[in-house]
Image (spheres, helix red, strand yellow):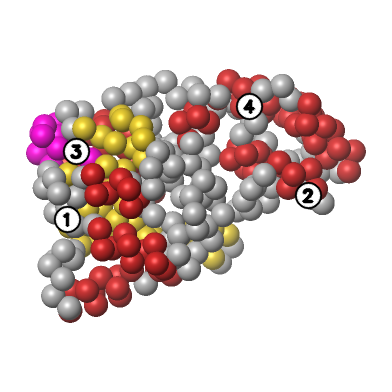
Amino acid sequence: MKFNKAPLPFVGQKRNFLKQFTKVLNESIEGQGEGWTIVDVFGGSGLLAHTAKQLKPCARVIYNDFDNYADRLAHIEDINRLRQQLAVTVKDVPIKSKLDKHTQSLVIEQIRSFKGYIDLGSLQTWLLFSGDILENLDQIYKESVLYNRVRKSDYSLATGYLDGVEVVSKSFDALLPEHVNNKNTLLVLDPPYLFSEQKAYRKAEEFRFISFIKLMTLIRPPFILFSNKHSEIIEYLDYMTEQKDERFMGFDYVSVTAAIGKGRTYKDYMIYKF
């Protein structure tokens, strides 16, 4: 089964780039990927690794699950059970409206007493204002205002989502040296963006400028690199090209502009070189 978005919420999943990602993979890697390794270095939701395996089933696809997303997928039944309970509690509150104090107290008590897996990534989409990040359960318990953003239906089970994909959990600077010397290894790189909010990356160290420098020292073509306008990545790669760094000379990119609220947009890039 092919997924066009991650089975569970994940900030920064690349579903808006799947069309472009598919096009570049199919144009650059022949057939079903025989002899190729594709490493999703900052795996996130695993959507890129899943897509790569669907497109190139004979390739070895490695998903670096540094955020424990696979563990979340294993608990979808619990996540759905808590969603069902909360949906009943907030059923009389208009969607996207603030919870009154009584309903908010009931919601918090349901979460506290729930006997099962509690998924922070789902809770933040159900109860916090759009775009807010839930870092721990105490944040929910102490939050002065919660909202009814509880989805109306269960999440589908992620059956087959990671079939055939190798799951590892390593820092990028430990994983990359294992693969950069293989010319038939495609590096798929979606690091935390410089100069952007990084709270969504719960399990990783904050990705600072020195981390970016380490990453750019390690990578080589073929690669697909995701970033955004705020990171000044295009300007950086243009500079590296001016310095005759052959790893980046001739790079290409596509951009996607999306809305994040009334009058607010952001621009993301998919940069690639084969």
State the image coordinates of residue 151 (x, y, percent, origin top left): 63, 34
Q: Look at mark 2 in the image and give the residue it sits on.
A: 143
> Residue 8 vs residue 106: left or right?
left
**Nearer-N-terminus badge (4/1):** 4
Residue at coordinates 90% horizontally, 38% vertically from top-left? 102
Looking at the rendered structure, the secondary structure element under dot 2 is loop
Looking at the rendered structure, the secondary structure element under dot 3 is strand
Q: Look at mark 3 in the image and give the residue it sits on.
A: 37
Q: Look at mark 4 in the image and give the residue it sits on.
A: 117
**Nearer-N-terminus badge (1/3):** 3
Q: Quadrant of residue 116?
A: top right
Labelled pair 4, 1 in contact (Cβ < 8 Å): no
Camera-side residue: 181 or 223?
181
Span highlighted in magenta in the image: 27-38
Instruction: Sort mark 3 into few (<14), some (14-19) or many (20+) by Cα contacts within 10 Å.
Output: many
Q: Which mark is residue 221?
A: 1
Judge whether 129 appears above or below 240 on screen. above
Residue at coordinates 28% horizontally, 25% vertically from top-left? 164
Q: Label 1 sits on what residue type?
A: Pro
Q: CA distance from mark 1 to mark 3?
A: 13 Å
State the image coordinates of residue 182 (x, y, percent, origin top left): 13, 45
State the image coordinates of residue 19 (x, y, percent, origin top left): 29, 45
**Nearer-N-terminus badge (2/3):** 3
Camera-side residue: 62 or 205?
205
**Nearer-N-terminus badge (2/4):** 4
Looking at the rendered structure, the secondary structure element under dot 1 is loop
Residue 211 visible to an observer of this rendering: yes
Residue at coordinates 71% horizontally, 21% vertically from top-left? 115
Tell whether position 5 is magenta: no
Residue at coordinates 48% horizontally, 36% vertically from top-left? 68
Labelled pair 1, 2 in contact (Cβ < 8 Å): no
> Residue 187 vs residue 114: left or right?
left
